[in-house]
Amino acid sequence: MKPARFEYVAAKTVAEAIDARSSFDDTVILAGGQSLIPMLNYRVAQPDAVIDINRVPGLDTISVDNGAVRVGALVRHRQLELSAEAFAAHPLLREALDNVAHIPIRNRGTICGSIAHADAAAEMPAVLVCLDGFVTAQGSGGERNVPASDLFLFHMTTTLDSDEIITSATFPALPKGSGYAFEELTRRHGDYAVAGICAVITPGPDGNCASASLSACGIAEKPVRLSAVEAALVGTNLSDDAVSAAAALVDDMVTNEDDGAGGRYRRQVARTLITRAVAKACQRAAQGRA
Amino acid sequence: MLNQPDRTATQGLADEDRIPVSVTVNGEAYERSVSPRLLLSDFLRHELRLTGTHVGCEHGVCGCCTIRLNGETARSCLTLAVQVDGCEIHTVESLGSKSALGPVQQAFKECHGLQCGYCTPGFLMVVTDYLENNADPDLTDAGIRTALSGNLCRCTGYQNIVAAVRRAHKIMHAG
Amino acid sequence: MATRTFGEPVQRNIDDRLLTGQGHYIDDIDLPSVAHAAFLRSPFARAKITSIDVSAARAHPGVLGVFTCDNIGHIDQDLPLLIPHPCLVGPRTQRPLARGDVYYVGQTVAMVVAVDRYTAEDAVRLIEVDYDPLPVSVELEDAAADGANLVHEDVAGNVAAHFVQNSGDAAAAFARADHVTKITVRVERSTAAPMEGRAVCARWDRITEQLMVWDSTQAPISVRGGLASLFDIDEDRVRVVAPDVGGGFGQKVLFFYPEEVLVPMAAIQLDRPVKWIEDRTENFIGSTQERTQVHTIELAATKDGEVLGLRDFFLHDTGSFIPYGIAIAQVASTSIAGPYRIPNIEVEFKAIYTPTVPVTPYRGCGRPQACFAIERAMDKLAEELGLDRFEVRRRNFIAPDQFPWKREGLLFADGLAVCYDSGEYDTALSKAAEAIGLDRLDEMKADARARGKYLGLGLGFYVEGTGLGPYEGGHVRIHPITGKIYVNTGLSTQGQGHDTVFAQIAADQLGVDPSDVIVVEGDTGAFDWGVATFASRAAVVSGNAIHKAASKAREMVIEAAANMLEAAPGDIELAEGKARISGSDRAVTLAEVATATNPLRYAFNKAAQSATQFAPASKHDGPPLADGKAPGIEVTDYYSPPYSTWAYGCHAALVEVDPALCTVDIRQYVCVHDCGNMINPMIVEGQVIGGMAQGLGGALYEKVQYDQDGNPRNAGFMDFLMPYATEMPKVDIVHMETPSPLNPLGIKGVGEAGTIAVPATIISGIEDALKPLGAGHFHEAPVFPHMIFEKLGGADQAKAS
């Protein structure tokens, strides 16, 4: 299990990296490498060139702005997880990050890299989707923001052009008065999710659900927004029955059927995690108000 | 001499472009030219002959090859040697010697935290990191087990490794 | 009397080296100009090879040799059938490199040797092979069915072996039974997955014509015998060393893996050292696996639950080849009655070829399957008769005064009739009940219900025939200069702690500290009589051999010291590295004794002066070395067990199931075990808990999966789910020590003990937990969450949360 030959480009600027992307037929970006290098070792990826962006200055910053958190392309999972400032502003991120693999992997793996890798069972893409976040990408055509809703195409595939590089990802602020939760089921600690649910619930002054954002990983070919569940929750009193009824609407979204039960087991897991995540989010919202 | 160039790992890669790498490993500076595809695990083991770092899966799951890269644990099988230019690395060889075991090594010995010894260097690096990088490490069973998750051991069933973590913490703070 | 270290938790001699990165695993051996091998492996489960073109690979820069079946000389032959048995109706073994046919995904087709592994892997991809795929029947039952696609064209019905054994008269027992319980259980395939894969490094010395092989093996002496035989070289010219071995668990016993033969062949042909390090993918597709069996077991019982007879028919998946004979199926069939008297047994099995990785023993070797079958059947019997699970077991246990308990007609893996030597089964069960808190079970179930969970009691009792023959040796020698004790035996260690327990055994006899005993094993250059490490036999067989040798060495030391000190032998005691007259200061060191018993010409050191020819102590009437005497203190002795010794134990667990997520949480796990006298309880516990972790894998996580075309679906650590520390519960161990009457040390094996009962225990706990939900029976191992979901009706259980 040794990588095949490739050219190595140690980019010193984003522009150099973009140039390199256009100079070879098949390139990959090396940031944390925690998904890429296994693929190289297995030779399932045999790129012409590996473009290492680890020496590009300025990409390793976390900026917090009014509750929103922007992470540069070289921000490691662990770095964000341990950032007191990011936690104070946006505690959902740490809760989700805690589910990502194991510490040695989080020490190296980057959030933007995980988003670019777009594994359908990965946590941070689902968080980005839940929060209506976006990535900033640079390519030969310049810089643009790509909303999460337009980013993920299917498992391990994004809509980005082949010469584009994600330079940052922005996780918008949690709504005022909201509660959040990230609930996940894995077969073993740190594994990719059988299903994971990201939930942000904002109760109104009457205690009824004013707004709800939910997304899931692991259940489909990409991280998905659970719009039907959200719509069913809004306006309800968030009782157990109301949440269960809404959670049942996830069933149609579950297309990943490799659970040994033709998807039925995963549907039940998704429903259960939704009810648990919503309950936890509601509890947190209530604590926030208290 | 230990730091003489030796290319048994990559001698056939001579026709590939080689890239200079300067790296400090266990306090000693090394300069080498390496093929870009050379994994850090192979670099440490076969170029620098620091064979204490083991290779168990080459896809990042088992943790045998865990080292500390600039003070943080990392999989050396998921790192290219060219990436560590200018970096500081610590491997199991830095933790102590047979005549003077370090506290984590001593604890593993006292608690029978190893059997075949193949996964052990990875665990030692992870535990060292856990106890050194946390002012107040969680020493509950659950806390320790979470810290150890990410490293596979096929011999011990982990229980004695959990005990060794507590024991190491005690040794380190015995004053 | 010296302090006895037997029974003490002596720390391990080997650890300082392993903890400091100074181990010597095969890939750490750095030979000058060593070349590296990589293999092209079959991508098809069954296919005809129509052509192989290696020209591009051969021309690749850095490639030193490319081998197919056409240029490996006379080793292009079927590898040996290692354990022949009359019931093998269609024994087949593989060739080092495929000729004409491939029989599983992963089978070696070609070997590239290059200047480094990266280049070798590059060149492997340049080999072009045309295959003509054949239809396959992959699942065990499918392969055994009429009209199945055949793995070997000339082996009808895919039946490799068919065997029926009888003990007593099962038919009569069934005829007079009040009740018959019948269940079918299925255990799935797993793999040992040692953290260090297999590895071989070989060097041919053209001048001395000696072949040196470093092999990450459990059986260096047997590997040497095979290599000498295959290459037609005198055994003395082949040395096999198993240095530090990173786990084995059965996978590294002798089967003659292709790589083990091909790497030395390449070293000879290329006249250059060659090394092959198995990578993780190769370990999943090229190293043997075990477990798949489907048992249909019937118990004939009285209405009081006394089991009069047992019938078991099972299919055993042997993969594509059967180099190790019927060992696994035989162990399963002879362990099937567990700790119960059951005087009438009929057990029949068929070993079936499937187009998958060949099957050979993995820690447990048929016992986990047998234990799962009998223990689940006992639970079913209790349920059907309305009896308590503990009580039905009690009524059938072999009582302590009924040993030896022989099962005439059932031949164990050593070719001898099954005969349990000793045990206190009822006590073990009671201790398990007490430790798990059986009296508080209802309370704990209620507590779980209050949290939306369901809790159940898991129970599993196992027996384990251990310490099989034929024999092992022990060589003990006192070094004249250092006075240290050198101990050798023929088998090898994979980290179990042999060196420490063997040192304790020798140390106790010779009155030294175990750290002054240097144990060298796994090196045919040091000791070359013996067999291998397998079947929980090292401590029993080598341990007793070393004990016998050390006892004789002790007598020699006492006799020599008595002469030197001019005292009666009965007055000599050995302690602290000295032989001393009891109650006095007069003593000689072991070094002095070893020196004095070796008549010298040259005085290497001060002690040696006394052994030279003009020294007063050297005066003698006859020749310096009396007729019949050997120089120094050196003894070799052997131990050959009369038959296997049977360890046993009882596991109990509190298992909690989340009915919504269908996940399993083991709240408490108790392991009562009895391996006879314990040499070192610390090491025993390590073995038990480590084995338990592998058992946990087999209960809840690990299953080697193939698709319907025979492609492995989870050949890596991402998808083959070995438990991390987070999955493994804390295990409470209760030791019992019923000595074995069969050997001088009174010990039994413990290597596999932890593994055997875990699936039966945990899965019976799941079943018990989910009884209130009407989930029914769990007769498959492992149990995955989706299986619990399906047992719960696959309906909307989300509300249950």
Image (spheres, rainbow, N blue to C red):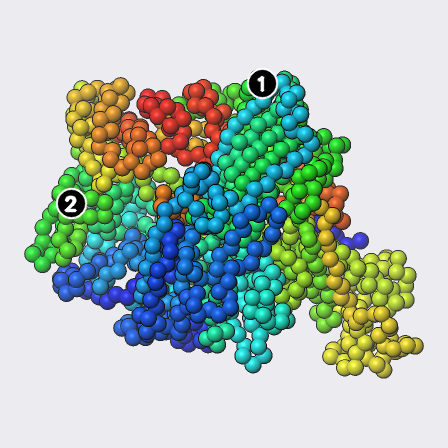
Say if C259 sits above or below A82 in the image: below
Residue C92 at x, y percent in the picture? 51, 53
Residue A37 at x, y percent in the picture? 30, 57
Say if B76 sits above or below A128 in the image: below
Dot 1: chain letter: C
Crowd class of label 1 (few under 14; some 14 to 19; many from 20; radius 10 Å): some
Residue C661 at x, y percent in the picture? 36, 30
SS at mark 2 in the image: helix
Nearer to me, C771 or C614: C771
Q: Is residue B97 left or right of residue C650?
A: left
Q: Which mark is residue A151?
A: 2
Dot 2: chain letter: A
Q: Which mark is residue C407?
A: none
Say if C777 sits above or below B134 in the image: above
Crowd class of label 2 (few under 14; some 14 to 19; many from 20; radius 10 Å): many
To which residue does mark 1 refer?
Answer: C385
Q: Amino acid at mark 2?
A: Leu
Q: Is residue A6 visible?
A: yes
Say if A196 sits above or below C228 in the image: above
Quarter occupied by residue B71: bottom left
Kindly check if marks 2 and 1 are in contact, taking CB atoms under 8 A apart as contact.
no
SS at mark 1 in the image: helix
Q: Image point 15% across, 45% down: which residue?
A: A151
